[in-house]
Image: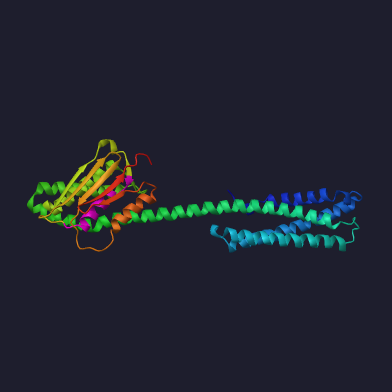
Amino acid sequence: MKDPSNWKWTRPVVILLLTILLYLFFLEKFVSSLWKSVSISAAWMLFAFLTWQVMSEWNDRNKRRYPHISQTTRRLAVTFSGYVVIELLSQGLFFLFVDTARWDWEVVTLTEYLTYLFLCMIMILVVGALYELIYSLNQYGITLQEAEAIKKTALQNEFDRLKNQVNPHFLFNSLNSLSALIDEDRVIAGQFLDELSSVYRYLLHTNDNGLATLKSERDFITSYLFLTQTRYGEAFEADVSIDEKCLAGILPALTLQALVDNAIRYNVVMKQKPLRLSIVSSGQWLEVKNSIQPKHITAAREGLEATLRRFSDLGLALPLVFDDGETFTVKIPIAMNY
């Protein structure tokens, strides 16, 4: 929808309507003389044109001064107050001009003048209201687009941060594990390398919109958990069991990886007390559970908070978080249609 200030046809239409209003209201004043009618009409159209120009400049000035949609009330008050003042001055100057020009038209009574002035005001305010309505709708649309762009940028930045977080530290640890495996077990080392390739292939081809199917997330986390279990050995136990019927579901990409990393970061992982983690589907929910054996870390769970925020930003139902002191559980609603 175009800004009404760009509607070139409105100026001549409004001026014509005001001229017609003048004719209709003071018709009996003009019938006695064609020359008088033409002269006064021409003068009125000139005054209407100048009035329009002044009002347009006043409107544009206030749009520049109060551009944001939150300033609409103030802009309306200032703009319409100006319209009233400008119209009063214009009408007063017009009738003063006619009287000074001594065109000898019949005397206009105060009642006639005030009634005519009232009708002109109504027309000006109606046109001004139409302008402001279209302008406000345009500004509202622009505000929504800007907010959506900011939200999309923030979401993309968060997604890129997650991918970059996986890349350096995880690659360094994986290469160290691979180096040790080459000497110990070449078969396992080959499998480890295949799974590492699968992980990075997924990271490179993940959709930019930040969404992934549960099937692709399951395949990715299976490879990721193999690498993690190889690194920690008997200190880390993981189980993945997801119903095939749920694999078409949608969730934010790298959600499972973020929850696995969250479990490892905030819990002790040791052979004598292995960290147990499970990813299991239950109806329309995906439950990610880990045993609680906390490290002495007082920092907030930033990774978990960021994951929950991504669900909200993508318009998905938020996961539920449970902590009974022994098991930490995140229940993720499986969105089948997005």
Q: Residue furthest top?
A: 245
| Quadrant assignment for the C terminus | top left
The reply, left or right, for residue 315 in relation to residue 139 is left
Principal secondary structure, stretch drawn in magenta: helix
Residue sitting at x 28%, y 46%: 331
The stretch drawn in magenta includes residue 48: no
In the image, residue 176 lies at what x, y percent? 15, 57
Query: Residue 264 colored magenta?
Result: yes
| Residue pictured at 71% horizontal, 60% vertical | 84
Query: Residue 158, percent across and down?
Result: 34, 55
Q: Residue furthest left?
A: 184
Which portion, as a residue range, is magenta?
A: 251-268
Q: Quadrant of residue 269?
A: bottom left
The percent position of residue 29, horizontal first and vertical second, equals 88, 52
Question: Nearest the camera: 5 or 232?
Answer: 232
Residue at 72% from the left image edge and 52% from the top image edge:
122
Residue 56: % across, % down = 67, 58
